[in-house]
Amino acid sequence: MNKDEALNKFTFMMEYRNLSSNTVNMYQYYLSQMFDFHQLEDVSILDVSMAQKYVVHMKQTYAPSTLNLIISAIRYFFDVVLETPLSRRQFPNILYDPVEITVFTEEQIHLLLDTKDVRLRVFLLLGLDAGLRVGEVARLKVSDIDSKNMLLYIRDSKRGKSRKVPLSNALLNALRKYWIVYRPDKNGYLFPSVNPGSKNPYINQNYINELFRKHIKQFSFYVPPMRFHNLRDTYATLMLKNGCNIFSLKKLLGHSSFSATSRYIKYDISDLAQAPVLSSLMEIE
């Protein structure tokens, strides 16, 4: 089976399961990358050791959470296309502490935003100032910008959830500068695909990730595997730190449960400096 036949069958099975278009696109991308990494023409020779070598290679670029998405894509491919299911023992997920997140400092934020690339600046502000996921950025439509009510509409995002987030003056100004240069279709996506042959009319989120990674690597504070999602982490942590309650933040982030939002509470320890200690309370010297 050649790689085109394999990807077609893989795509059909994902669409049959009614997976989101975002998941389909990501899984297709990661599988194509694996085929290219091993320079495969006949994908039927794939085995678990080859899949493991690819994941080890991708560890140089991607965070553990993304690596686990890649592992899920590969595991599903082996199951429905090669019909040789991989057990979690053979091909386990990457272990990591999900509480460990990166939050940019005020100085780092200013350095990141100091760019003449008007499109990149909009990408950065959508993450930092609106808390959007990279996939949400990619799929924004022009009609999702409500400048009259100063709102952004995020439609059919993770698990089909939609929400509204405030549109700041800084982001609106950046969007207007972007509009002057790029002139997207008023009835279409804000960021059209950069690949004329793409099946999707909107920009690929991996393109945004790579653009961000290229941008941040020029700064001395860059540490692998910093990624676009760290902009959202920064947004969430600073919102809590500056008085936003967890109920409002949950809505702004589009989380399904408080457990996802609570990790930002665990990360913000600024209030611990004012916390009393036992020896002071009991006047112990």
Image (tube, rainbow, N blue to C red):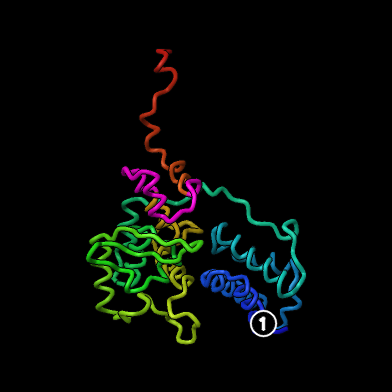
Does the image show residue 285?
no
Tell me the quarter of the image containing the N terminus: bottom right
Residue 100 percent coordinates (x, y) = 50, 48
Quadrant of res 13:
bottom right
Residue drawn at x 24%, y 66% as measured from the top left: 147
Residue linked to disc 1: 3
Residue drawn at x 43%, y 77% as measured from the top left: 202
Quadrant of res 23:
bottom right
Question: Pointer 1: residues within 10 angstroms few (<14), some, or many (20+)?
Answer: some
The one nearer the camera, 30 or 8, is: 8
User: Looking at the picture, which amino acid does disc 1 mark?
Assistant: Lys
The one nearer the camera, 207 or 246, is: 246
Residue 136 percent coordinates (x, y) = 42, 66
**Label 1 residue SS:** helix
Q: Residue furthest bottom?
A: 197
Tell me the quarter of the image containing the C terminus: top left
Magenta stretch in the rendered image: 237-260
